[in-house]
Image: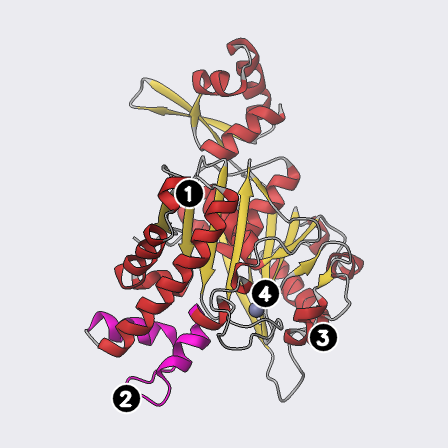
Amino acid sequence: MLLVLDVLRSDGPSSQAALARRTGLAPATVNNIIQALRAEGIADVQWINGREALVELVSKQGAIVSISVGPDSVHGSVFNFAKGVRSNGVRELKKEDRPGADPTAAVELIQSLAQRAGVAVTDLAGVSIAIQAPIDRQTGAVAPWAANRMPLWRSVSIAEAIKAEIDVPVVVDNDANLAALAEWTWGTGRGSDCFLYVSCSVGIGGGLIIDGKIHHGGNGMALEIGHIVVEQTGPVCFCGSRGCLSTLASERSILAALQGSESSKDSLAEVIGSAKEGDPACQRVLYEAGRNLGRALANMSKILAPSIVAVGGVLSDAGSLVFDSLHASIEENNVPAFCPSIKFKQALISDATLLGGVAAVMSELGQGVSELPAWMGQSVNR
Ligand SMILES: [Zn+2]
């Protein structure tokens, strides 16, 4: 039965004939599985034009809380599948009061979101915790080299700390890994057996989805794309290297490049806005960010040979102002010779981290949602 679920999760709505082809199962067996999934309320059948019936995964019961934990705040949403309602919540933690978000703040936000949905915490189907830092899979804690960003989580085994307070299924992962899962499930990565995702906003993170699963590597540090060295003599990075992609294409680095110039800005969104209005300095820094991102992705592509590479985050909103130089880097590094069919695309799903958390919990529960319903708050870039 897992095979049919896997195909539905990967390919989206599919006909029974397509499911039989993809799984190698007899049509009668596929039909029996679909009937069982329908009886459990996990799958549904939709008729298209009264001729073709497509099977899709649905979820019509339970509630899932998905939160994202950063250095200064925790934000998240509760997705109430029984009612088809999403509610958002946030806890800003001022630095004067305390040094940042801690496990207690995360637990309190989960509790308040459950309350808002009218669901007892113990009745939640599951909880996803996205951490805006790399997670060591052996200790379950934030990697020591990045712990200065989130000091109150230092050495905290995150899943254990949350489960000690809230005893429901808990998924903990890096925020970019979860965003990659959302983009693979509902966005431009759908159906890809090897999907590479990079998000460029305040920081740079990446995720790799192989055969529908997040690739974590031996210790969870896989896909730390932000720390690929692009310029050996570039600026020092907090990770201890020089010239990491994070020092060349993140919001902070782009703003720093403009600092002191007449085009100095306070946010990456402002830089993109001015560049689109013709500011040549803003166009220049975005061009360079795209070129450096392209170099990193060219190296990644030669190692991983993904079928699709998606770029998300605020930087991707720059469109051709970033993608032209990114593509030029890809060509310059002769990636097409190694991977002729590789495609570099703008990510489709914004708010991908929280939605990826829902996808991860559903995967744990053996469920899924083939098409993102409007109430789940999908916003599409284009
Ligand atoms: Zn670094």
Q: Are marks 3 and 1 in contact (CB under 8 Å)?
A: no
What numbered label is drawn on residue 262? Answer: 2
- Disc number lying in front (1 or 4): 1
The magenta segment is: 249-277
- Using the numbered discs, state the Cα–Cα distance from disc 4 to disc 2 in whole angstroms: 32 Å
Number of other residues with Cα within 10 Å of mark 4, as a class: few under 14, some 14 to 19, many 20 or more: many
Q: Earlier in the sequence, mark 4 or mark 2?
A: 4
Q: Residue furthest left?
A: 278
Q: Nearer the viewer, residue 322 or 317?
A: 322
Q: Is residue 299 left or right of residue 285?
A: right
- Using the numbered discs, state the Cα–Cα distance from disc 2 to disc 1 in whole angstroms: 38 Å
Q: Is residue 89 above or below residue 121?
A: below
Amino acid at circle 4? Gln
Report the magenta stretch's main SS.
helix
The residue at 30%/64% (across/down) is: 318
Q: Is residue 134 visible?
A: yes
Amino acid at circle 2? Glu
What numbered label is drawn on residue 308? Answer: 1
The secondary element bearing badge 1 is classed as strand
Asked if the beta carbon under badge 2 is closer than 8 A to the nearest atom of ligand 1, the reply is: no
Q: Earlier in the sequence, mark 3 or mark 2?
A: 3
Number of other residues with Cα within 10 Å of mark 1, as a class: few under 14, some 14 to 19, many 20 or more: many
Q: Say which residue label 4 marks.
A: 132
Q: Earlier in the sequence, mark 3 or mark 1?
A: 3
- Using the numbered discs, state the Cα–Cα distance from disc 3 to disc 1 in whole angstroms: 37 Å
Q: Is residue 103 left or right of residue 277?
A: right
Ligand 1 position by quadrant: bottom right
Q: Say which residue label 3 marks.
A: 152
Q: Is residue 62 visible?
A: no
Image quadrant assignment for residue 3: top right
